[in-house]
């Protein structure tokens, strides 16, 4: 037996396009770090992010939005030239123990960046001890050359050079 269902797509579209429900863009990605200074060096010197705001946060606001009591955390917002932003979080209290990470873990696994020359970056980062999964490889469709490395806190970083 087949049942007919009537869906008013215009009503659904209007609901999701109303200002109160509209997602405008991704604001930033938060990265919890175990060594803030080491991560700052990596993201500023290697990835060319610029620190835009650094704060030591505690009190009722941060406790409430993150769901902790007596939380103390240093946050550092960093941007690239077109406004893309990451936030490093160094928990002074409520510090979690780092565990092994894998590229196929459930949930967010990596940050991807478009780069002008992945081979040059691979050579420079490798000389400085940055760990890579493999050498840069060309995608089967010839569209991009790609390599994955790891930031000091374990975040996988995908470096993508567009070839076409």
Image (cartoon, helix red, strand yellow):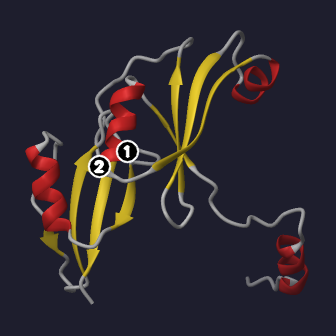
Find numbered disc 1 in the image and state the secondary structure of the residue it sits on.
helix
Q: Position of residue 125 (x, y in %)?
A: 17, 49
Circle 1 Cα neighbour tier, 10 Å, few/some/many (<14 / 14–19 / ≥20): many
Q: Does residue 133 lie above or below 146 as drawn?
A: above
Kindly identify the residue that appears in the image at 53 percent across and 14 percent down.
92
Quarter of the image with the N terminus in it: bottom right
- Tell me if label 2 and label 1 are in contact, CB under 8 Å: yes
Residue 26 percent across, percent down from the top left? 62, 59
**Mark 2 to mark 1: distance in Å?**
6 Å
Seen from the viewer's position, the closer of residues 96 and 45 is: 45
Q: Quadrant of residue 62?
A: top right
Q: How many marks?
A: 2
Which sits in the foreground, 35 or 30?
Answer: 35
Residue at the spot 73% in from the left edge and 67% down from the top edge: 24
Q: Residues within 10 Å of mark 2 (few under 14, many from 20)?
A: some
Residue, disc 2: 46
Residue name at image x 20 percent, y 77 percent: 139
Q: Quadrant of the C terminus?
A: bottom left
Q: Which mark is residue 18?
A: none
The residue that label 1 is drawn on is 43
**Left or right: 53 in relation to 143:** right
What residue is shown at x 20% (from left), y 67% (from top)?
118
Q: Is residue 18 visible?
A: yes
Q: Residue furthest bottom?
A: 164
Q: With respect to residue 107, does 65 lie above or below?
A: above
Q: Say whether residue 128 is left or right of residue 13.
A: left
Residue 52, percent from left and from top: 58, 45
Q: Is residue 27 above or below residue 142?
A: above
Q: Is residue 104 visible?
A: no
In front of the other: 142 or 124 = 124
């Amino acid at each position: 037996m087949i049942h007919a269902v009537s869906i008013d797509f215009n009503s659904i579209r209007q609901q999701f396009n109303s200002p109160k429900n509209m997602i405008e863009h991704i604001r930033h990605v938060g990265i919890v770090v175990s060594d803030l200074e080491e991560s700052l060096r990596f993201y500023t010197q290697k990835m060319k992010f610029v620190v835009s705001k650094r704060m030591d946060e505690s009190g009722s606001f941060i406790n409430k939005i993150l769901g902790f009591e007596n939380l103390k955390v240093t946050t550092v917002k960093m941007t690239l030239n077109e406004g893309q932003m990451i936030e490093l979080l160094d928990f002074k209290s409520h510090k979690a123990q780092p565990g092994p990470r894998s590229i196929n873990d459930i949930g967010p696994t990596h940050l991807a960046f478009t780069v002008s020359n992945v081979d040059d970056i691979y050579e420079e980062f490798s000389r400085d001890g940055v760990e890579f999964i493999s050498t840069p490889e060309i995608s089967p469709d010839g569209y991009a050359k790609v390599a994955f490395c790891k930031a000091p806190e374990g975040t996988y970083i995908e470096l993508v050079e567009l070839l076409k």
